[in-house]
Image: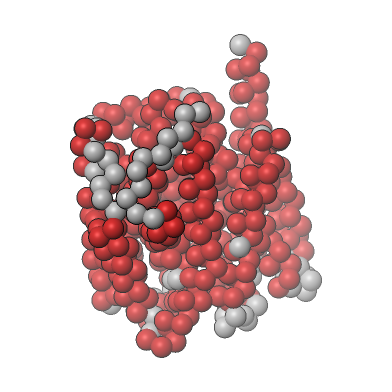
Amino acid sequence: MTQTTRHLPIARAEFIALMAMMFATIAFSIDAMLPAMPDIATQLTPLEPTRATLIITSFVLGMGIGTFFAGPLSDAFGRRRIMFLGAGLYIASAAVAWASQSLELMLIARVFQGIGASGPRVVCIAIVRDLFSGREMARILSIVMIIFTIVPAFAPAMGVVIIHFTGWRSIFLAFMIFSLISAVWLGLRLPETLPETNRRPLKITLIVDAVRQMLQHPVVRISIFVQTLSMAMLFSLLMLIQPIYQFVFDKLETFPFWFGAIALSSALSSFLNAMLVVRFGMRRLITIGLAMQIGLSTLVLMTSGSAAGQGFAVFAIWQAFVFFQAGLSIGNLNAIAMEPMGHIAGMAASVIGAISTVLAAVIASPVGLLFDGTIRPLVGTILVLALLAFLLMMYMARVEARAQRA
């Protein structure tokens, strides 16, 4: 593989830190909100407190919609413009959410905040691609992602600190400051990385054609569906995790610390995947992870009525494996989907991310309304989604086998 590195206008350590901060906008915007959901439920939807969980999926829905367009827009108009546009929309939407007196207005603001966050999300990867290629690009992205995985471990604790001193609405002010710092940092230190001669015109027909090509390819189509189900498992967990800690286990005060420690298991799965994927292959690792998820979820669901089954240790182990399985699957699924799409790689990355994120948000949104004071709705949902994903992976194996015989 050809490996090139363009002149880096700032120190490498500063560049990696800037890219990690841009990408971390997503995790911070989701996980810092988790400790605020009880207060949001009390103040904005006291009669239906479970609706407060929509504060998570509304943001994810917007992020998925924005991802569909952020890539092509940055290819046409440059990275910096789309980054600044996204940051501006993100900050304005956070301001609206901060001032909202109804849950409905806040959810609308969160959708637009997610659309704005898709700018830094996509532009970060695009900038790294502009400046690096080959193994050096993979190395930079790996370092950025390792830093990114640390953010969910600390974001809930940061949310608790903010709520304690200034109230839950101040979390939206923290979002505004976070985005403003990253935008100013990029504006002052990193020039445009996509020359005008390398830009591509924005054509809706190109996006439509990319969607058609991906959905017509059976392996890519299956991979997108499985990735959707895997992300829906993760979003469902994020929606119900705080109510479960509060009402099932009475651990609301220590929730941020448990959540952070357990969330780090996803980073462990990334390291393990890097060591095993060359030997066992992406599809096999995904299938094994899903099979283990089915077995563990079935065991937890069957014993959830007993004192042992409802024990916190059992749930914590199960929660850790949901994070672990997501870290083992989503990256590999994205790689499987991208492999046949090298001729439209940039467009394909945007489309795959958008379709899987939006559909996952749609699937996960009703899950928050199912909470009944036990862990059963969440575990049952994860079990069903994992079973569907496993069956699709088995079908993918047969599709690949037929293609090899043909």
Q: Nearer the viewer, residue 123 or 156?
A: 123
Task: Say which quarter of the image contains residue 105.
Answer: bottom left
Left or right of 286? Residue 10 is left
Eyeballing the image, is 126 above or below 86?
above
Left or right of 322? Residue 155 is left
Q: Is residue 363 among the parts visible in the rendering?
A: no
In the displayed image of the protein, which residue is found farthest to the top?
A: 406
> Residue at 29% across / 44% down in the picture?
193
Q: Is residue 117 among the parts visible in the rendering?
A: yes
> Residue at 44% across / 57% down in the picture?
13
Left or right of 328? Residue 348 is left
Eyeballing the image, is 383 above or below 398?
below
Picture coordinates of residue 349, whole percent (x, y): 41, 38
> Residue at 78% across / 74% down in the picture?
307
In the displayed image of the protein, which residue is found farthest to the bottom?
A: 165
Q: Nearer the viewer, residue 339 or 395?
A: 339
Q: Nearer the viewer, residue 43 or 211?
A: 211
Eyeballing the image, is 60 above or below 129?
below
Picture coordinates of residue 220, whole percent (x, y): 50, 30
Picture coordinates of residue 260, whole percent (x, y): 58, 69
> Residue at 51% across / 76% down in the picture?
157
User: How many numbered marks, from 0 up?
Assistant: 0
Which corner quadrant holds the C terminus? Answer: top right
Picture coordinates of residue 207, whole percent (x, y): 31, 32
Task: Say which quarter of the image contains residue 374.
Answer: bottom right
Task: Say which quarter of the image contains residue 202.
Answer: top left
